[in-house]
Image: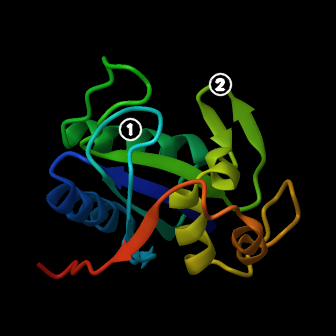
Amino acid sequence: MSWVYISLGSNIDREALTRAGVDALRQKYGELLLSSVYESEAVGFEGDSFYNMVIALQTDDSVSDVAQVLHLIEDEHGRDRSGPRFSSRTLDLDLLLYDDLVLDEGKLQIPRDEILHRAFVLWPMAELAPDLQHPQVKKTYGELWAEFDKEKEKLEPIEFDFSK
């Protein structure tokens, strides 16, 4: 079984689609570990604020199979890929980590670079797995978050009830 970490983001019908994304992952993979949900401003474009979180799960699926499942879940929840790279999202599921695999195959980059550069990924990652070590920089996510410039992006944890 491999440990997989996934970031989830949404700024279109964000409460319902955050819940739907978690539900879809739970239906496919079973037990999930969930970070808090964080609200962040749109990065790279003018738009509504996002809900972001990180989800951890274990699977026997290959890294490419997990990536395909995430793509399918996004599509099933109205993801439009025709717009610019930085734009509003119904549901954005990014594969952050697959055990300690290091991979760069075009669109599939593991570990995902934004872990080190975006508060909306690093803070929930540090919350969920503070003692896990980044496979390239060899620091824990807790250490990386402690060193991160927290003035770069506005990010706040919010109350979010997944039982609704």
- What's the residue at 70%, 53% (across, down)? 116
Q: In this rendering, would 55 be left or right of 130?
A: left
Q: Secondary structure at mark 2?
A: loop
Which of the 4 image quarters holds residue 2? bottom right
> Residue 162's spot in the image, x, y percent?
22, 78
Amino acid, disc 1: His
Colouring method of the image: rainbow
Label 1 and label 2: CA atoms lie apart by 15 Å
Q: Which mark is residue 106?
A: 2
Amino acid, disc 2: Gly
Q: Secondary structure at mark 1?
A: helix
Q: Residue furthest right?
A: 138
> Residue 39's spot in the image, x, y percent?
36, 63
- What's the residue at 78%, 47% (across, down)? 102
Classed neighbour count for the residue bearing mark 2: other residues with Cα under 10 Å, few (<14), some (14–19), many (≥20): few
Q: Which sits earlier in the primary sequence, circle 1 or circle 2?
A: 1
Q: Which mark is residue 71?
A: 1
Q: Nearer the viewer, residue 152 or 64?
A: 152
